[in-house]
Amino acid sequence: MRNILLRFENVVTKQNGVKGLNKFSFLIGSGEIVGLVIINQQGITDLFDIILHRIPIYSGQVFFGDYLNTSKKRNKTAIIDRHIRLVQGVSVAENLFVFRESFNSFFIKHKLLQKEAKKILDEYEIPLLATTNTKQLSQLERIQIELLKEMMAGIKLIILRDLGKLLSYPDLNQLIPFIKRLANEGMSFLYVDSYPDDVFSHCRRLAIYTGGMIQKILYSEQINKENLLPYWKANIINSPAKPHDKNPILKLSYSNKGEEQLFTAVVSSGECLSILDRNQRFTPSLFKLINNQEDIEEWSIEFLSEKKNYSLFFIPEHSTQKSLFHECSYMFNLCFLLDTKVQKNVLPAKIIRSIRKEFKREIGSNYKLSSISHLDKYELLNLVYYRVLLMRPDIVFIFQPFIDLDMDLQNHTLGLINQLKQRSIGVVVLTSYLANLENVSDEIISKTQ
């Protein structure tokens, strides 16, 4: 075993009497890449806060090197995720050297900084100019520069969170050798995700995290999708869609700037089409088209039957944040946009009563809430999808439904998609990773190049 960098011993955390970590024990050695698969989010924020900010714990012990968590010595830790931590609008060289605690010069010698930055970029084979503005960096380049910056600052442990959702397959495969090189030089990594990802195969150990504790440890020779899938599939709601006669509604085609047709698919009522878009090549443009922001020549949407008025609906990524009004009532959120369907400026009370009766089993007493700000993510996801059930569109487009969701919530989302299918709603899902969508999909188009 390598020198132990971080060790948790039976750690318990509590926030307002609610338990987070529950007798959590775990360790990371120097120069290790350790994976953490999150089944559910209980206590995960506490875990990160302990590693990054040394928050107090209820019981147990945490050691960083030879120091107890209660000592005043600062942990040399950092996190890299979807949030940008580089200073925007300045050069790569300035981010690497100027904007760090150890920089103590009153004068900035730009040529000297650029020369030193070029040495480091060349040494780690990062094809960037030291003068490149950070606003121009790709997602991969941004992560590489953040890693270099943390290495130069003397950081010993970095949490890598959900990189599989941020990067395409080629970019992820390009990043892995860089991470492994830093690990060989003594830096440790905790790679955190909620879905079996290719990076996990490069981990020395992989921990299955659920309920505030480690459920199982897999070692390098055991790390494969076959050993992970039992945990991933444990809670999947896989109720089959009701039998229905196929009713083709929409033909969706994508061409390369109007020339080469890359794919075409027909969506029928009660069916689910999933498009795997790891490079985010198709998703942004289709979202603009569906959201009526602009015409996109690459996309072609053709309605296939003689029905005069088709209704389309879309659920954006981060749907619980972007499509709900958290300070408004539950019924306002549920019925939002319904006035356009019934062509009433104000919904009559009898319609509201009818909706409450129809969704009584699903929403329980939530209809009484004057604000949804205190609902958990499970209930907020329900509200997003119940609104679609209420609107009964012909087709619903769902963009990146699994971002920021743990395994339990991803599985719950699959069940909600099944409910849409059972109501004969056609579903189109655009996602950067499948997350077991094969359980509800009638067709999957995979475009990873």
Image: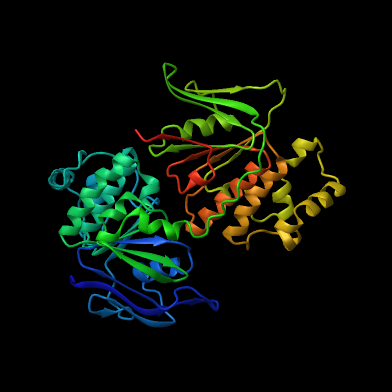
Q: Is residue 348 visible?
A: yes
Determine the image quadrant of residue 269: top right
Horizontal relation, residue 39 to residue 224: left or right: right
Estimate the x, y position of residue 353 in percent, counting from the top left. 84, 52
| Residue 436 screen position, x and y as percent | 47, 48
Location of residue 308 with respect to 365 vertically, above or below: above
Residue at 65%, 29% in the rendered image:
247
Is 301 drawn above or below residue 72 in the view shown? Answer: above
Answer left or right for 315 relative to 347: left
**Residue 155 in the image: x percent, y percent?**
24, 63
Quadrant placement of the C terminus:
top left
Residue at left offset 34%, top offset 43%: 139
Q: Closer to the camera, 138 or 256?
A: 256
Name the residue located 29 percent from the left edge and 75 percent from the top edge: 7
Query: Which residue appears farthest toward the bottom when viewing the image?
Result: 59
Figure label count: 0
Q: Quadrant of residue 448?
A: top left
Image quarter (top left, top right, bottom left or bottom right) of the N terminus: bottom left
Can the viewer see residue 98?
A: no
Q: Residue 165, percent across and down?
A: 40, 47
Residue 59: image quadrant is bottom left
